[in-house]
Image: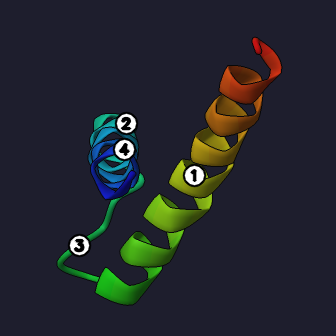
Amino acid sequence: MLSTYGLKLVIAALLLFGIDRLDLYGHPLVAIKRTVLVACPACFAATVVDNLGG
C-alpha cells in the first residue's frame, strides 16, 4: 500500500516538473504541498474504483 502512494507521489512530482510547477529550489515547501495535493486524490480515486469492481 505504501508503495502505491510512493509511486503516485513520484508520478505527480514528475507531472508537476513537466509543466514547470515544481519549484524545489525557490519554494520547496510549496512544491511538496502541490505534489501531495495532486497525488492524494488520484490515490483515493484509484482505491475506490478498484474496490467497486468486486
Mark 3 vs mark 2: give the one in front: 2
Mark 4 vs mark 3: give the one in front: 4
Which residue is more in the foreground, 35 or 22?
35
Q: Which mark is residue 38?
A: 1
- Which amino acid is tagged 2? Leu
Q: 34 left or right of 27?
A: right
Q: Which residue is mark 3?
A: 24
Looking at marks 4 and 3 on the same chain, the residue that comes earlier in the sequence is marked by 4
Going by the picture, which residue comes out furthest to the top?
A: 53
One can see residue 27 in this view: no
Image quadrant where residue 26 sits: bottom left
Looking at marks 4 and 2 on the same chain, the residue that comes earlier in the sequence is marked by 4
The picture places residue 21, in percent across and down from the top left corner, at 42, 53
Looking at marks 3 and 1 on the same chain, the residue that comes earlier in the sequence is marked by 3
Going by the picture, which residue comes out furthest to the left?
A: 25
Looking at marks 3 and 2 on the same chain, the residue that comes earlier in the sequence is marked by 2
SS assignment at label 2: helix
Q: Residues within 10 Å of mark 3 (few under 14, many from 20)?
A: few
- Which amino acid is tagged 3? Leu
- Which amino acid is tagged 4? Thr
The picture places residue 13, in percent across and down from the top left corner, at 32, 50
Q: 25 left or right of 9?
A: left
> What colouring style does the render use?
rainbow
CA–CA distance in space, label 1 to label 2: 9 Å
